[in-house]
Structures are given as C-alpha cells and as structure tokens.
Amino acid sequence: MLTVYSTVQCTHRPAYVVKNGVRSASFDVPERVDSILSAIRESGLGVVIQPAGTGLDPIYAVHDAGMIEYLATANARHRTEDDTSTPVFPTFFAPPGQRRRPSCFEGQKGFYCTNMGVPIDENTWEAAVASARCAVTGAMCLRSGEQFVYALCRPPGHHAGPDFFGGYCYLNNAAIAAGILRKNDDRVGILDIDYHHGNGTQAIFYADPNVWYGSLHIDPDTDYPFYAGYADETGTKAGKGTNCNVPLPPGTSQELYISTLETLLDGLTSFDPRWLVVSAGFDTYIHDPIGTFQVTTSGFSEIGRRVRALSKPTLVVQEGGYRVPDLGPNVVAFLSAWIGEKENNSDKTERAKEWTISHSTITEQ
Ligand SMILES: [Zn+2]
C-alpha cells in the first residue's frame, strides 16, 4: 500500500478557532497525523512517499481563482495591511445573494470564508497545498495502475467548495483528486464517510453527470454544516441523480450506520464508476470528541471490507477524526481491508522506488 504524505502539512497548527464567541482549541492538530503515521508503520501496511511537486493547475481546475489568490496571500496581507500577528479571521460575511467581491482585504476576508473554524496563519497555505498534492499524487498513482492508495491529507478538504472554505478545510483534496481522475469523461464515485456532510464536494460536482457523490452523515438539521446535506439534494441539470445524501440521527448505532452504508453502496454500484475516491473521516468513532455516532474500531474494519468489495481502483483521502490516540488504529483498521493477499514488503518497496525514479520530486521517507 502506498501512503502519500508531506511533513509540510504539519506546519499548520491553528493557534485557535472561535466558537460561541470565545477562543477555543482547534481539534485539527498535527498530532492526528503522528497517530496515523505511527499506526501505519507499526502495522507494516506499506511505504510512505512524498507528494509530487505538481503545480497549482489541479487546484485551479476545482476552485475559484480569486479564492486561491486570497488563500495564498491572506497571511502576508494581514501582516502588512492589518499590522498584526494574529491569525486571519473575518469580521464581516457576505450575505446570500450578495456576491460582489470587493478589492479591499477587509471585505475579502468574509467573501470566501464561511465560519470561524478556518484561521489562516503563516503556514496555512503551504500546508493546504501540500495536503492537496497528496491527493493529486494519489490520483496519479491510480492512473498509473495502482489499485489502492491512501492520501494522508491534513488539513482536510470536504467542506471547501468552488468558492468557499470552512470547517477546518481550505482546499478540497478529494475533489481535486476526482478532477484528475475524471479526465476523458471517466466516471468517478466519491463516497464520503465522514461524520459531517461534505458540503464543499457536493457543491463542486452538483451538476456533473460524471461524478457521483454519496454521503451518510449527521443530520445537518442538528449539526454542521447545517445548510446542505439533506436527502432531497440529488444534483441538478445534467448531474440530476448523481448526488445522494443520507442524513442520520444523533447517536446512530454501528448497526444502523453499516446497514445504511450498504444502501449507499448499492447506488454507487449502479453508477459503476471507473474510479473510487473515499472521503474517509473517522469522527463517526464512538469516542470522537465532536461526533455522536457509535462506530467502533472493528466497525471501521467492516466498513473497509464493504467498500473494498466494490473492487474499484480506490483512493482513500483522509478527512476528519479527532480522537487522537485512537485515530491511527481506526485508520489502519479501515485500510487493512485492502491489504493482504498478494502483496509483500519487497513488492511495495520496489513500487515506491519506481515512483521515486519516474517522479523526481517523490522520495521515500
Ligand atoms: Zn467531520
């Protein structure tokens, strides 16, 4: 198994977010990655490679150019124009239907940002780009013949839409990967198993007939992202019928979760994509500090087996999951479904070397 990860991603350590009007610690801490990496290495699941030094084109293919420019320059502008070292947060937000982009920095802060969970500091942009490049590299690996790749993306991505970001997410890693995979009109399925609805991913592909997006998640009538993720959102125009939301109640049991997943997988099977991207969040975990679902570590193994049974070339993209000590074991429990039978360590090492040779910017860690 190939895992794609860059240490640049860990430079993103939000000083704080704002919740209920007060400074609060962000749950998206670099230690999440430490937990995952050490669990992967201890399990012998495979080789960790760095992402290719791809340009920004795959990001521009998914996101608004103005938002990319804003994210790339916000920290520097904040330092010079606001003359402060605090993280960038908006004071004002653009109301629905009022989408005039002002030229001034103060106005732009709330033009793309949807909430106070996405501060921008000096490392945020580079970390977000590195995270996106992991997904891009994973997609390139699939297109080169790999059957299964894990992109260890952080910050996560599925709350970032074409021209908005929020909920710990700045760039939509899964969507950027899907943008690579859908070339030549290939059909791509995106299965989102994070606790929260991927409102950004839905928005990006809502009218796209070649990308199926399916998600089971906490009912947005009760939890973030609140304003999308309802069952009657099924796509639009040529994409009508390619969006499938299954909201679940607070406290959903593992049994109900897995039986609901089966229904979603039936829809995915009917769409018959060439490629599968899994937006893999582990905040459905029974002990997650921000979730209420009851999925256990062995439950993630079962979920992995069911997704694996689709027998599609699969890219798993890391999304949420905030119980740090248990995150790594949960990720490994899920990924283990794909590992096994035919692959041995020397095969994995040889393939990683091939990648190192064919992509000069990729090196084994
Ligand atoms: Zn989540």
Image (cartoon, helix red, strand yellow):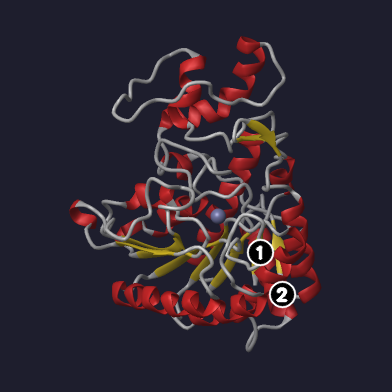
Percent across and percent down for residue 266 are 35, 78
Q: In the image, what residue occupies the spot 51% across and 26% down?
A: 70
Q: Which disc, if any, is residue 3? A: 1
Q: Which of 38 and 350 is in front in this view?
A: 38
Q: Few, some or many C-alpha atoms within 10 Å of disc 2 (few <14, some 14-19, many ≥20)?
A: many
Q: In which quarter of the image is residue 103?
A: top left
Can residue 59 be seen in this snapshot? yes
Can you say which quadrant of the picture contains the N terminus?
bottom right
- Vertical placement of residue 76 versus 114, above or below: above
Which quarter of the frame holds ligand 1?
Answer: bottom right
Q: Earlier in the sequence, mark 1 or mark 2?
A: 1
Q: In this view, does 197 lie to the left or right of 298?
A: left
Which corner quadrant holds the C terminus? bottom right
Left or right? Give the position of 364 relative to 184. Answer: right
User: Does residue 212 appear to the left or right of 287 in the view shown?
Assistant: left
Which residue type carries mark 1?
Thr
Asked whether residue 350 appears in the rendered view, the answer is no
Instruction: Tell me where residue 277 appears, x and y as whole percent.
Output: 47, 64
Q: From the top left corner, tell me how far across and down residue 14 is, in percent.
A: 69, 37
Q: Which amino acid does label 2 sit on?
A: Leu
Reply above or below: 262 against 211. below
Q: Which residue is drawn at 38% across and 73% down?
A: 264
Q: Dot 2 corresponds to which residue?
A: 45
- Indicate the secondary structure of the residue bearing disc 2: loop
For the residues bearing labels 1 and 2, Cβ distance under 8 angstroms: yes
In the picture provided, is 306 more to the left or to the right than 212? right
Q: How many angstroms separate mark 1 from mark 2 (CA)?
A: 9 Å
